Amino acid sequence: MLSKTILNAFDTQIKNELEAAYLYLSMSSYCNALNFPGFSKWLRTQAQEELGHGMKLFDYVHHRGSNATLQAIAEPKASFKDIVEVFDVVYEHEKKVTALIHKLYEAALKENDYASQIELQWFITEQVEEEQTASMIVEQLKMIGDNKAMLLMMDRQMGTRGVA
Ligand code: FEO
């Protein structure tokens, strides 16, 4: 069984992952309204991936003989200045999730919870990739600037991402 502290920390992280899913789904809707089907699909896929992260943690809690208690999910941001702001927010959000995962890992270290440390290593690795991807998209969008033709090309390319 997980200790009370670690269980509470996992419950919070399940909520964080689902909150990320909700935010990205909200962004997907915003991009759809802007007639960017590719960005919209990419974010929808990302939302599914976040849901998968939440479920992975949910299952882990149960595998450890504990029970997850679901926490309230905040209403996501729904309006943005432009597509650059959308991905700026994605990048900032991923950095925040990384910090939260690291905090959770530190708690597992402090309690000598070896199984949780191993479980969280997957998330630590995943965050490196997630931050790198988000940062690259932000930089590419900045390069493109106001060039609408390039933006439409990028939208098409983003839409090639497979379903999670
Ligand atoms: Fe599950 Fe993008 O962090």
Image (cartoon, grey):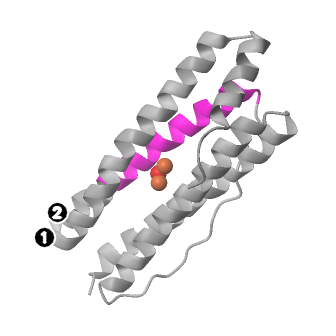
Report which residue position mark 2 lands on.
109
Residue in the image at 35% along x and 87% along y: 66
Q: How many residues crowd mark 1 within 10 Å: few (<14), some (14–19), many (20+)? A: few
- Residue denoted by label 1: 112
Determine the residue positioned at 41% across, 78% down.
59
What residue do we see at 67% from left, 34% from top?
86
Q: 110 and 131: which one is in front?
A: 131
How much space separates mark 1 and mark 2, taking CA atoms?
5 Å
Instruction: Report if residue 84 lies within the magenta region.
Output: yes
Asked whether mark 2 and ligand 1 are closer than 8 Å, the reply comes as no
The amino acid type of the residue labelled 1 equals Asn
Residue 136: x, y in percent? 49, 25
Picture layout, residue 90 above or below residue 126: above
Identify the amino acid type marked 2.
Answer: Leu
> Dots 1 and 2: beta carbons under 8 Å?
yes
- Figure check: 72 above or below 81: below
Q: Residue at x 65, y 45 (%)?
A: 43
Magenta residues, start to end: 81-102
- Where's the C terminus, which quadrant? bottom right
Secondary element type, mark 2: helix
Q: Considering the numbered disc 1 on the image, is that residue within a helix, a strand or a loop?
A: loop
